[in-house]
Image: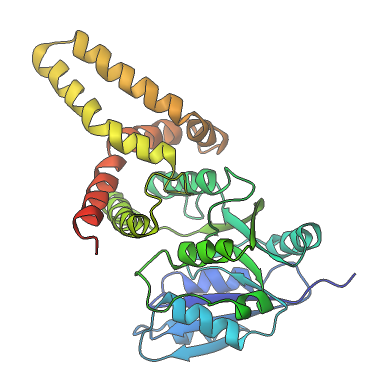
Amino acid sequence: MAEPFISIVIPVHNGATTIDRCLAAATSVDYPNFEVVVVDDGSTDNTADIVRRHPVKLVQLQPNRGASAARNAGVAAANGEFIFFTDDDCVVQRDTLRKAAKAIAEEGGDCVIGGTYTPLAHDHALYNSFQSVFIHYSETKYREPDYIATHAMLIPRQMFLASKRFDEGFLPILEDVDFCHRMRREGKRLVMRPELVVGHIFQFDLWRSLRNAYRKSRWWVTYSLANKDLLADSGTASVELKTNVVLWPFTMLALALAAVLGAGPWALVAAGLVAFNLFVSRGLVAAYFRARGGIAFTVGALLYYLFVYPTAVGLGGLRGLLGRR
């Protein structure tokens, strides 16, 4: 049986720092029947010049119209029987499309197939791989997930064209969540294949990590209120993360009282809250150990998750609550 023709569709806006690595990987996959379509969404840097160095099909939009419009334009320009969406800061693995073809053969050509990030980030460091492990774990918990992210989304081209496509008037992010929720309501299957992975170039420091958490939390809450699923266990908006955020102020208060009043009952309260939090997130804790980033990375990532990360997620969620429309 011949391998299906797959179009890798990559939107990019001012991605000069990552697009070269992205396309070097995407054009070098170990698969005989594919093309790469890059949509330059109104970049004002030298992204287009970098893209032209690679054997890809370049589509240029002016002015900047957003990721939804870029992905829709990429599919319109693609020739593949299947579309594999990824991002300009993602590094497709050499065997990703072979695994994609295997997934198509096993799952059938009538569903949306998802992948995720490699457990350790392409630019492995604390804040980068903290995020990569968290996303990998959260997105692969369920065989049939709530949504599939466009950093690794495989969909039959005709199914996509028959849908309402990505909403070009949607929020600044989460257009893939909205798209998948609409597909599910239409009776389409979403299937997660954890072996279908791409590396991600995060380029995070502490500030960028927290800013990313704030922004995503803000729009997740905005969308979830409108979608009436605020408490749902939905990918990275997981029950583990929501529990972590809810427990954080109580844990910090108990630690502060223990520091002021002396170790004693409040220290036990804080320890109990942390223990309960770790129990709820035990699958995520195990994922950090399995990621093989080293003991220093694992301990640092878990301390960051418990005591720092919830501040940005909580503030972003509060902004979403206050700014809902």
**From the viewer's perspective, is residue 93 above or below residue 263?**
below
Which corner quadrant of the image does residue 161 belong to? bottom right
Q: Residue furthest left?
A: 260
- In the rendered image, residue 108, in percent from the top left (x then y), is placed at 77, 63
At horizontal 27% and vertical 39% (from top left) the residue drawn is 308
Q: Nearer the viewer, residue 322 or 74?
A: 322
Classify 281 as above or below 73: above
Q: Nearer the viewer, residue 170 or 153?
A: 170
- Does residue 157 appear to the left or right of 168 in the view shown? right
Residue 162 in view:
yes
Q: Position of residue 216 (x, y in %)?
A: 34, 56
Number of numbered callouts drawn: 0
Q: Quadrant of residue 126?
A: top left
Residue at far top of view: 264
At 48% from the left and 49% from the top, the residue drawn is 135
Looking at the image, can residue 151 be seen?
A: no
Q: Position of residue 155 (x, y in %)?
A: 65, 69
Q: Is residue 288 left or right of residue 81?
A: left
Res 30 quadrant in image: bottom right
Q: Position of residue 2 (x, y in %)?
A: 87, 73
Quadrant location, the N terminus: bottom right
Which quadrant is the C terminus positioned in?
bottom left
57 is higher (above) or lower (below) than 308 = below
Residue at point 49%, 35% (across, down): 284
Q: Is residue 267 left or right of residue 304?
A: left
Q: Nearer the viewer, residue 143 or 20?
A: 143
| Whether residue 281 is situated above or below residue 318 in the rendered picture | above
Frontmost residue, 35 versus 242: 242
Q: How is the image coloured?
A: rainbow
